[in-house]
């Protein structure tokens, strides 16, 4: 009964959400700056082949938006009336991916062109192609439609501009050209319903605001704080990529402040969010890490996701670690347990794939090993594959004001010195400390239960 009622309400909301499209506006080739010479060769091949096979074929999304803003597009997305199967048959180098949202990836070397079939409004409630939760979240969105319907299903007006390969004109169905001109980010349709359908759109709003330096239109901004918790319904695996995109946009620091402002950060990284309140130093570490990330992106240097996540999660880790130390757990097991507990909680929000979680934990573990430099240890540590990342992380902790007793400066010197210099640095440390009451301590269990 209640279920039926919720569905009734959510359908009502959806109906309200059906956007009334403003009149179609067309820019002829002479009226816009998008030139074929700037379009990815692979994307052009896809467009031409679809067109020659009798299909409609458009470039859509970020590539059109960015070109109109004079920026270099990150990727090229294609929209067509061909079904995924038809696209798949046209390209040997393609495969159909996704269940919730089926699309085709066409591969050209290391680049992938995403080809999406026009989405339409579902006629009936739940079918094999279209499913929505009682709360209005889209669980499956594979109903095909016309280009007009497709435009209405996209997120922001500035992302719903289409470049037609048939005559090189640009179509605007939702007022995106006007919004680009006014540097305004506006959701298509009723914002609350669109966020309910897909809460990731709240993160995308933050990303585009930060990356493009656009203002978030009032009605698009209004529901975010109140509905931030909707993010908890999104599959944690999907959020890993989305969050990475947020922080690799070249505007990570600004993005972080916006996430905080819109109450979204705590939904993604709850342990760090709580730790900021107890220990403000840890906030500085995250800010510094993000500022460094932006710097690296602007210098075209690579950013390791493991390092980024190590920093984003560090505040929460420190908090748990401190608790365990207070209760008498020795440092190494405490760090291990803190890592386990933190990741167990974190994975309910964002699943961190193992290939990133392992190196991330190595960076953390090495923070405990870096102070142990006596004897051969220093040279051994230097050989660790993750030494460089761990050393950078140590620098970060120091810049953020964590007390590390000049450890980073010592390691900087050690790496710069020749062998004689290194030996001198070591002798300054004195002999390795023998733990007092060693024999006794061996008998005591290392890990408390
Ligand atoms: P970027 O520069 O990051 O690639 P983009 O806008 O192209 O930005 P994509 O993730 O590549 O972002 O998505 C391509 C297009 O697909 C978007 O421009 C938008 O039209 C549509 N889209 C993507 N995600 C959503 C979503 N969650 N809801 C509705 N439409 C979406
Ligand atoms: Mg894109």
Image: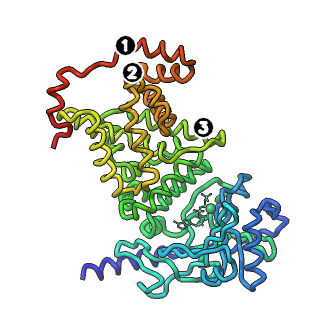
Asked whether mark 3 lies closer than 8 Å to ligand 1, one says no
Quarter-of-image position of residue 195: bottom left
- Mark 3 vs mark 1: which is more N-terminal? 3
Vertical placement of residue 418 versus 11, above or below: above
Residue shown at 46%/78% (left/top)? 15
Q: Quadrant of the C terminus?
A: top left
Q: Label 1, on which residue?
A: 430
Residue shown at 42%/50% (left/top)? 357
- Mark 1 vs mark 2: which is more N-terminal? 2
- Mark 3 vs mark 2: which is more N-terminal? 3
Asked whether mark 2 lies closer than 8 Å to ligand 1, one says no
Q: Nearer the viewer, residue 379 or 98?
A: 379
Q: Viewer-nearest of labels 3 and 2?
A: 2
Whether residue 403 is visible to the viewer of this picture, yes or no, is: yes
Q: Nearer the viewer, residue 147 or 383?
A: 383
- The span from disc 3 to disc 1 (Cα, nearest Å) is 39 Å
Binning the other alpha carbons within 10 Å of mark 3 as few (below 14), some (14 to 19) or many (20 upward) gives some
Label 2 sits on a secondary structure element that is loop
Q: Is residue 81 left or right of residue 314?
A: right
Can you give x and y, in whole percent of width and height, for residue 63 in the image?
68, 61
Give the quarter the ligand 2 occupies: bottom right
Residue contact at pointers 3 and 1, CB within 8 angstroms: no
On residue 72, the disc is: none
Q: Label 3, on which residue?
A: 295
Residue shown at 67%/71% (left/top)? 78
Residue contact at pointers 1 and 2, CB within 8 angstroms: yes
């Amino acid at each position: 009964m209640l279920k039926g009622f919720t569905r009734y309400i959510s359908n009502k909301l959806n109906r309200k959400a059906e956007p009334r499209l403003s009149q179609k506006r067309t820019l002829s080739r002479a009226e816009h700056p998008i030139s074929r010479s700037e379009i990815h060769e692979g994307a052009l091949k896809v467009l031409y082949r679809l067109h020659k096979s009798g299909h409609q074929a458009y470039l859509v999304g970020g590539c059109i938006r960015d070109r109109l803003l004079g920026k270099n597009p990150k990727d090229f997305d294609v929209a067509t009336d061909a079904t995924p199967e038809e696209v798949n048959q046209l390209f040997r180098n393609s495969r159909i991916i996704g269940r919730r949202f089926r699309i085709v990836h066409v591969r050209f070397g290391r680049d992938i062109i995403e080809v999406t079939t026009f989405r339409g409004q579902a006629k009936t409630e739940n079918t094999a192609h279209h499913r929505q939760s009682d709360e209005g979240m889209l669980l499956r969105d594979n109903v095909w439609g016309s280009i007009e319907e497709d435009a209405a299903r996209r997120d922001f007006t500035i992302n719903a501009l289409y470049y037609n390969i048939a005559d090189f004109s640009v179509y605007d169905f939702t007022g995106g050209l006007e919004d680009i001109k006014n540097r305004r980010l506006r959701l298509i349709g009723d914002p609350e319903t669109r966020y309910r359908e897909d809460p990731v759109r709240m993160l995308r709003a933050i990303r585009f605001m930060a990356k493009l330096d656009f203002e978030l239109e009032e009605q698009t901004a209004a529901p975010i704080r109140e509905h931030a918790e909707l993010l908890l319904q999104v599959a944690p695996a999907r959020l890993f990529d989305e969050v990475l995109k947020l922080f690799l946009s070249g505007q990570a620091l600004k993005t972080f402040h916006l996430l905080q402002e819109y109450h979204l950060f705590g939904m993604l990284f709850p342990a760090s969010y709580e730790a900021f309140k107890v220990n403000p130093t840890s906030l500085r570490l995250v800010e510094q890490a993000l500022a460094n990330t932006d710097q690296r992106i602007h210098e075209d240097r690579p950013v390791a996701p493991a390092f980024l996540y190590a920093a984003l999660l560090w505040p929460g880790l420190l908090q748990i670690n401190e608790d365990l130390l207070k209760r008498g757990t020795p440092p190494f097991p405490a760090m291990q347990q803190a890592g386990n507990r933190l990741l167990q909680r974190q994975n309910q929000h964002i699943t961190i794939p193992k290939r990133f979680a392992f190196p991330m934990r190595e960076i953390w573990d090495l923070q405990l090993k870096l102070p142990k430099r006596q004897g051969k240890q220093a040279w051994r540590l230097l050989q660790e594959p993750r030494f460089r990342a761990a050393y950078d992380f140590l620098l970060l902790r120091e810049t953020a004001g964590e007390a590390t007793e000049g450890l980073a400066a010592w390691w900087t010197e050690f790496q710069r010195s020749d062998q004689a210099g290194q030996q001198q640095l070591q002798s300054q440390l004195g002999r390795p400390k023998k733990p007092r009451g060693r024999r006794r301590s061996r008998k005591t269990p290392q890990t408390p239960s």
